[in-house]
Image: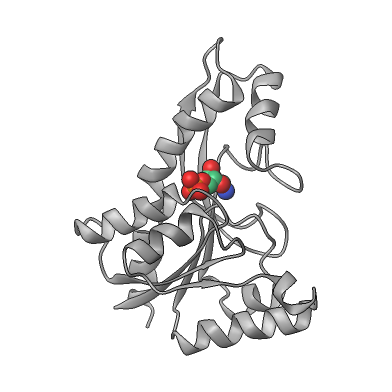
């Protein structure tokens, strides 16, 4: 059984989708071992605590903004919890390079657009959906990809499209895409879990 850590900063609906998929058995071979949030009030951390999932509030600010102390603490916690796979599910911070390097091929992220379009620095939250609407595109969607050095780069695992309607606001588009994310994120995790198991 692989041990999964989910990093989340906000509402935590994708965390919930992972939790439900494991609970109902559609996502298997993996357990939700740890939730890490940079925000002590996040929906993600509240959900984890309410559902008895080990949760940690870890933020660079807690280490006087010292990047090295923070990254060492992250590595220590992930090692202590024997984490095999990391999912960034609405994590609004850049994961330190040393963590990405340590878990190379085992860190994945969900992005609310069809990468490589509408990705990169500054493309998060409603900025993404505003940019899609302003571009006039009639199709958007969600992408799950491996995390490599740069924002939103890395091999794509799954993408699924969503229509963009003429009367969409960034909020209404975000909500439609969020439902798509809940569908593809557990599937993408299953693909990575199966491939890790096949190769170990
Ligand atoms: C999702 O749209 C995800 O693509 C983005 O942040 C959002 C997180 O939503 N990276 P939630 O906290 O899982 O509800």
Q: Is residue 178 above or below residue 158?
A: above
Front residue (pair 42, 157): 42
Q: Quadrant of residue 23?
A: bottom left
Indicate left or right for 65 with 142 as reference.
right
Which residue is pictured at 31% across the width and 63% down the height?
A: 51
Work out which residue is located at the far left of the displayed protein and give it: 24
Q: Position of residue 146 (x, y in %)?
A: 55, 60
**Residue 190 x/y as whole percent:** 34, 60
**Is 143 left, or right, of 192 in this rendering?**
right
Q: Residue at x 50, y 48 (%)?
A: 11
Quarter of the image with the C terminus is bottom left
Q: Position of residue 66 (x, y in %)?
A: 80, 78
Q: Is residue 23 visible?
A: yes
Q: Nearer the viewer, residue 42 or 24?
A: 42
Question: Residue placed at 70% from the left, 28% from the top?
Answer: 131
How many numbered marks have been drawn onto this rendered protein structure? Answer: 0
**x, y (%) of residue 58?**
61, 72
Q: Is residue 166 above or below residue 59?
A: above
Q: Is residue 81 left or right of residue 31?
A: right
Where on the picture, by quarter, is residue 125?
A: top right
Task: Check the picture and name the quadrant holding the N terminus.
Answer: bottom left
Q: Is residue 145 above or below residue 56?
A: above
Q: Residue at x 36, y 68 (%)?
A: 193
**What's the image's color scheme?**
one colour
Observer able to see residue 111: no
């Amino acid at each position: 059984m692989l041990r999964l850590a989910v990093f989340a900063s906000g509402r935590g609906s994708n965390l919930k989708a992972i939790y439900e998929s494991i609970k109902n058995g559609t996502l298997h071979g993996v357990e939700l071992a740890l939730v890490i949030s940079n925000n002590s009030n996040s929906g993600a951390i509240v959900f984890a605590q309410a559902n008895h999932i080990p949760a940690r509030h870890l933020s660079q600010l807690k280490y006087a903004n010292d990047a090295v102390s923070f990254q060492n603490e992250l590595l220590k916690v992930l090692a202590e919890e024997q984490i095999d796979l990391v999912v960034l599910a609405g994590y609004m911070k850049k994961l330190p390079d040393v963590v990405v390097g340590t878990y190379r091929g085992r860190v994945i992220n969900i992005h609310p657009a069809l990468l490589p379009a509408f990705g990169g620095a500054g493309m998060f939250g409603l900025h993404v959906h505003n940019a899609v609407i302003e571009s006039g595109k009639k199709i958007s969607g969600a992408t799950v990809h491996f995390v490599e050095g740069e924002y939103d780069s890395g091999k794509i695992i799954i993408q699924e499209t969503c229509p963009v309607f003429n009367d969409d606001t960034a909020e209404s588009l975000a909500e439609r895409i969020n439902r798509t994310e809940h569908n593809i994120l557990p599937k993408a995790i299953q693909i990575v879990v199966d491939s890790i198991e096949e190769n170990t």
